[in-house]
Amino acid sequence: MSGGYVRKADPKDAFVLAPKVREIDCLEIEAVGKTNPYNSLMRNFKVPNSQVYSIVQNDGDILGMFGVGDCAVLKNYGVPWLLSSDDLIPHAKEFLRNCRPWVKKLEANYECLFNFIHENNNIAMRWLQWCGFEVQKDKIYNISNEPFYLFVRSLSNKKQ
């Protein structure tokens, strides 16, 4: 990013980002993890084979954090994630230009990436589709009484 850059995350980044996490991301965190943004971000550092990165504005502000880690129950499956603040929105074009190579980096050690997304998280859904994920809207997963869709990127759709 010319207005910023991506680097390996430091746990201190979670402390900076957590109070600014987007409202829809907070809803997902509460529904899926029964926790708060800070604990959710910190948990990602402990997942086996985790890769955790921060999106940093040139002034040092943390705009978002993302990564992947091993799925606890499926071998060779990774669970990608992204949490951001609304401060990332003005950098959307630059973010989109740079995100596909990062997805390729995250998926390198897995045959499939998957996770769940709230049905109202429209910005993230469009981004996932841009990155080559399939958002499976044909089935709704009820997680803590909130509607979620499964999103997947497997060997069969990695060509993008």
Image: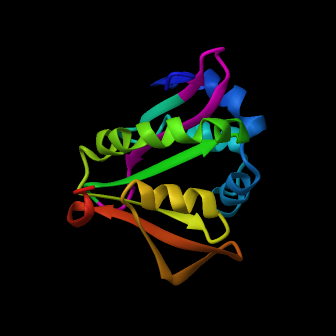
Res. 50 in view: yes
Decide which of 97, 68 is in the foreground and name it: 97
At x 64% / y 16%, what residue is drawn? 60
Decide which of 149, 98 is in the foreground and name it: 98
Instruction: Please say if 105 is above or below 61.
Output: below
Decide which of 13, 125 is in the foreground and name it: 125
* Residue extending farthest top: 59
Going by the image, does 17 lie left or right of 80? right
Q: What type of secondary structure mainly makes up the magenta span?
A: strand
At x 49% / y 26%, what residue is drawn? 1
Question: Can you tell which quarter of the image residue 84 is in?
Answer: top right
Instruction: Please say if 108 is above or below 121.
Output: above
Instruction: Please say if 27 is above or below 70.
Output: below
At x 67% / y 21%, what residue is drawn? 61
Residue 44 x %, y %: 52, 40
Question: Can you tell which quarter of the image residue 156 is in?
Answer: bottom left
Instruction: Please say if 74 is above or below 54.
Output: below
Res. 44 in view: no
> Quick check: is 115 in the magenta stretch?
no
Region in magenta: 55-74
> Quick check: is 67 in the magenta stretch?
yes
Residue 113 x %, y %: 35, 57
Residue 50 x %, y %: 40, 38
At x 51% / y 25%, what residue is drawn? 9
Going by the image, does 18 lie left or right of 44? right
* Residue extending farthest front: 93
Residue 80 x %, y %: 44, 50
